[in-house]
Image (tube, rainbow, N blue to C red):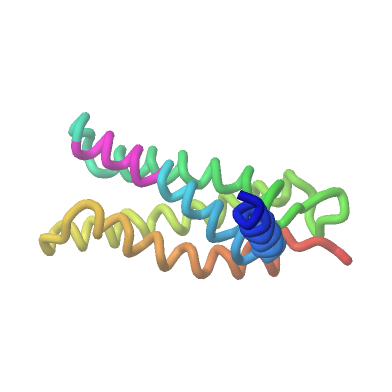
Amino acid sequence: MLGQSKKSGKFAISVKRLLKLKIIRYLFSGGISYLVDLLSFLFLHDIVKSPLPISVGISFILGLSFSFLVNKTFVFAANDNARFKTSYQIILFITLVMFNLVFTYMLVKLLLETGAPSFVAKTVPTICITLWNFLLYKNIIFKNNN
């Protein structure tokens, strides 16, 4: 039992150390944001049978709204020292969301038309967006003045 406690303690320390890395926090929060996006998309598109623009639009906005809150507070800890005030961060974020939404819709539509399953059609654009969003969040939108 005592040996297991030491292992558990080492694991907890390792997890804490990993969570100090922005990229790990970003990927973790992105995974949760993706689940919000994906599950709402699958629910709307495959169960409710909503039209594709509505399914993609609503699920995308839900996922990214959750993402904004988590990235601002947990991942990048943008605070009063941030390069931009919250209102300007929201404007930058919404601009990025609009671009990402058009990109996502076009790619999901293309992939579905070529016979890809809904899961694949939704995952491919999400991977692309994940990469460029991290760079933009870190270096522009949520950058703190240090």
Out of 76 and 58, give the one closest to the viewer.
76
Check if residue 39 falls in the magenta segment: yes
Name which residue lies at 19% across and 38% down: 46
Position above or below: 52 against 105 = above
The x and y percentages for residue 52 are: 24, 43
Range drawn in magenta: 37-46
Q: Which image quadrant for residue 42?
A: top left
- Position of 144 with respect to 101 (left or right) is right
Q: Please, which residue is most extreme toward the top here?
A: 48
Q: Quadrant of residue 28?
A: bottom right
Q: Which of 73 and 105 is in front in this view?
A: 73
Give residue 132's position: percent from left, percent from top: 52, 69
Q: In this view, does 97 lie to the left or right of 88?
A: left
Residue 134 position, x and y percent, is 58, 65
Q: Nearer the viewer, residue 132 or 87?
A: 132
Location of the C terminus by quadrant is bottom right
Number of labelled discs?
0
On whether residue 79 falls in the magenta region, the answer is: no
Residue positioned 60% across, 47% down in the render: 68
- Is 94 placed above or below 17 here? above
- Residue displayed at 71% across by 46% down: 73
Q: Which residue lies furthest to the front in this view?
A: 1
Q: Residue at x 81, y 60 (%)?
A: 83
Magenta part, dominant SS: helix
Q: Describe residue 27's horizontal placement relative to residue 102 as left or right.
A: right
Q: Is residue 141 visible?
A: no
Instruction: Name the residue at the left extreme.
Output: 115
Quick check: can you spot residue 74? yes
